[in-house]
Image (cartoon, rainbow, N blue to C red):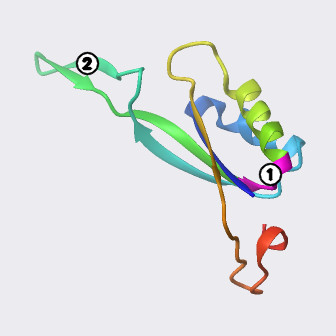
Amino acid sequence: MKRIIAIVRPEKMEAVKDALIAIEVSGMTISQVHGCGNQHGWKEHYRGTEVLLNMVPKVKIEVVVEDGEADAVVDAVMASARTGEVGDGKIFVSPVEEVIRIRTGDRGLSAI
């Protein structure tokens, strides 16, 4: 199993969610987050002083899928989240050792 974490622009959340639903991803977790990377934030003026705001709002979308589905998920996120501009986000793929459904005690793929 693979855990895929996508950090994307907030305005791309619905497009990414729809793309994941279209490829029949069974579940996802979506969180509002803040971070910085190559985008480095922006400058604003507050009471005559320049202030650097380097924590940019983003959306984090997490899914766990079978190994064979990971490439399709990555492709769907890239196609739906890409604008071609700095700040489009990142995708992280990592292995998952075990999944357990709390309600039933199911383990592995049946718990996804």
Horizontal side of 97 relative to 35 (left or right) equals right
CB of mark 2 within 8 Å of CB of mark 1?
no
Q: Which residue is mark 1?
A: 67
Image height of 94 relative to 74, above or below: below
Q: Position of residue 65 (x, y in %)?
A: 78, 54
Q: Is residue 54 left or right of residue 108?
A: left
Q: Which residues are magenta?
A: 64-68
Q: Quarter of the image containing the C terminus?
A: bottom right
Quadrant of image for the N terminus: bottom right
Q: Residue 31 shows which numbered tag? A: none
Q: Amino acid at mark 1?
A: Asp
State the residue lying farthest toward the bottom: 104
Image height of 94 relative to 52, above or below: below
Left/right of residue 92 with respect to residue 81 in the rendered view: left
Residue under the point 78% across and 44% down: 70
Q: Is residue 65 visible?
A: yes
Q: Which percent across, then down, holds residue 95?
A: 66, 55
Task: Tell me where residue 14 sits by quadrant.
Answer: top right
Circle 2 sits in a helix, a strand or a loop, which is it? strand
User: Which residue is painted at 50% across and 36% down in the image?
Assistant: 58
Q: Residue at image x 41%, y 40%? A: 34
Mark 2 sits on what residue?
44
Residue 108: image quadrant is bottom right
Q: Secondary structure at mark 1?
A: helix
> Closer to the N terminus: mark 2 or mark 1?
2
* Left or right relative to 109: residue 99: left
Q: Residue at x 72, y 34 (%)?
A: 77
